[in-house]
Image: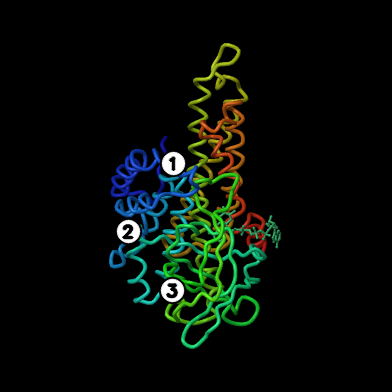
């Protein structure tokens, strides 16, 4: 019996069919170049925009498709299956940054930024993490102080996805005193901002086509209308409200990656022979793949339920945290075992499973580490 996600529709089938063909034909051939240059070309963002794959769940009035989160889920699944080099960047841009603007932006802010993000003219980033503060977001030290009518931002961010490409960065900055209540989200448009500087495009062990950067703010002047939500001190609450969607997107990518790893490995082990027989005929190989297929199916059913909850506006932090930690943990285990079944070839760059193995590893760390996920879940016990 073929399982079909409850949130799938015939309309989405048509969209996905075209979208997958586009990914395979127009984007996948450039993936190696992007890995080497450590970032995706702007033309890819534009092409994704033309396909309607950026900001699909944003209303048409702001350049989106006016669809539900099911479209975001489908886009991330398909990208992860065909050209995973683009997953993290698009996830941050469409699934996270755009939704902060949509949910907390004024009408003027939404009209100013969202259409450009939907077309790929603007790339978005979100800068929470600092050299001294990752998991403990309340410790953010970057400040945004009112000087005259403007905000003046000072501080340093690190590990920022899309940092090299970003035209627009949502900066988590301290507008008030210590702790969560002092934080605000302020949008920095990077063009012509003298106080903004991009640092290194960091060297990572995986996810090589995704630019991950240091960002520096040295008296970066930003107009007061770039504050998100209209009220200082709302930043931490806004982050907590949006993080379930970010975490679910990571889980969606994890499931797609597991399914791809299992498929690639099943194909490989049917072809490869040892001791005179295809290696899938060794019970160890078949059982390993059977176990992984079972887990991937369990993960998909759970994630589908989370997607339904999110579409209904009911996905809570605890459930999203469960999806994030468990699916990313299973993704890492699956990639490891599938690599093992490839033997020495699995360690070679030309076999996608080698990259899937290193790329998977970050999933347990970003978007809130899996330890932080367990802390959040434990509080509900
Ligand atoms: C490729 C990549 C892309 C990223 N993209 C972005 C981005 O776009 N925007 C952004 O803002 N950030 C981004 N990050 C940062 C990422 O979210 C952080 O690295 C992550 O939240 C962990 O923070 P940290 O690195 O400071 O680790 P730390 O917070 O120093 O944690 C180190 C270890 O201590 C554990 N730990 C910490 N606190 C506790 C606790 N209370 N209980 C138990 N264990 C604990 C952690 O789980 C971890 O194992 C990215 C990181 C990477 C590597």
Residue drawn at the location 57% of the way across and 53% of the way down = 202
CA–CA distance between discs 1 and 3?
A: 34 Å
Give the number of the disc on residue 31.
1
Which of the numbered marks, if any, corresponds to residue 119? 2
Tell me the element at label 3.
helix
Residue furthest to the top: 276
Task: Give the quadrant of residue 179.
Answer: bottom right
Q: Give the image quadrant in which the ligand numbered 1 is located.
A: bottom right
Confirm or deny contact between disc 2 and disc 1 (CB under 8 A): no
In the rendered image, residue 3, in percent from the top left (x then y), is placed at 42, 40
What kind of element bears circle 1? helix
Mark nearer the N terminus (2 vs 1): 1
The label nearer to you, 2 versus 3, is 2
Q: Residue 287: x percent and y percent?
A: 59, 28
How far apart are the alpha carbons under marks 2 and 3?
Answer: 21 Å
Quadrant where the N terminus sits is top left
Instruction: Choose mark 1 or mark 3, whichever is in front.
Output: 1
**Vertical placement of residue 59 versus 225, above or below:** above
Which quadrant would the C terminus be assigned to in this image?
bottom right
Residue occupied by mark 3: 104
- Whether ligand 1 has any atom under 8 Å from the Cβ at mark 1 is answered as no
Q: Residue at x 42, y 67 (%)?
A: 191
């Amino acid at each position: 019996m073929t399982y079909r996600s409850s949130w799938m529709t015939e309309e989405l089938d048509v969209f996905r069919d075209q979208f997958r063909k586009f990914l395979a034909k127009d984007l996948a051939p450039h993936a190696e170049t992007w890995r080497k240059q450590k970032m995706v070309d702007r033309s890819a963002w534009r092409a994704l925009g033309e396909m309607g794959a950026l900001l699909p769940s944003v209303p048409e009035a702001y350049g989106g498709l006016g669809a539900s989160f099911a479209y975001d889920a489908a886009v991330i699944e398909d990208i992860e299956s065909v050209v995973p080099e683009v997953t993290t960047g698009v996830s941050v841009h469409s699934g996270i940054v755009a939704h902060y603007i949509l949910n907390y932006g004024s009408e003027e802010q939404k009209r100013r930024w969202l259409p450009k993000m939907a077309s790929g003219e603007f790339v978005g980033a979100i800068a929470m993490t600092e050299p001294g503060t990752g998991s403990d977001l309340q410790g953010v030290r970057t400040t945004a102080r009112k000087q005259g009518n403007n905000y003046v931002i000072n501080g340093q961010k690190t590990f920022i996805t899309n940092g090299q490409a970003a035209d627009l960065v949502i900066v988590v900055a301290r507008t008030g005193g210590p702790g969560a209540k002092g934080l605000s989200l302020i949008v920095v448009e990077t063009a012509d901002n003298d106080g903004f500087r991009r640092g290194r495009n960091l060297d990572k062990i995986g996810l090589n086509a995704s630019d991950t950067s240091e960002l520096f703010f040295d008296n970066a002047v930003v107009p007061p209308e770039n504050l998100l939500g209209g009220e200082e001190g709302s930043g931490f609450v806004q982050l907590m409200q949006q993080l379930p969607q970010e975490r679910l997107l990571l889980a969606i990518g994890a499931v797609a990656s597991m399914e791809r790893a299992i498929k690639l490995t099943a194909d490989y082990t049917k072809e490869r022979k040892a001791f005179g027989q295809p290696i899938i005929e060794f019970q160890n190989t078949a059982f390993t793949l059977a176990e992984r297929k079972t887990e991937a199916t369990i993960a998909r059913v759970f994630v589908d339920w989370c997607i339904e909850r999110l579409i209904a506006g009911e996905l809570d932090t605890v459930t999203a945290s469960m999806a994030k930690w468990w699916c990313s943990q299973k993704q890492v285990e699956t990639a490891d075992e599938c690599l093992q079944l490839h033997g020495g070839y699995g360690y070679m760059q030309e076999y996608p499973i080698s990259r899937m193995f290193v790329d998977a590893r970050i999933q347990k760390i970003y978007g809130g580490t899996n330890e932080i996920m367990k802390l959040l879940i434990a509080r509900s016990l």
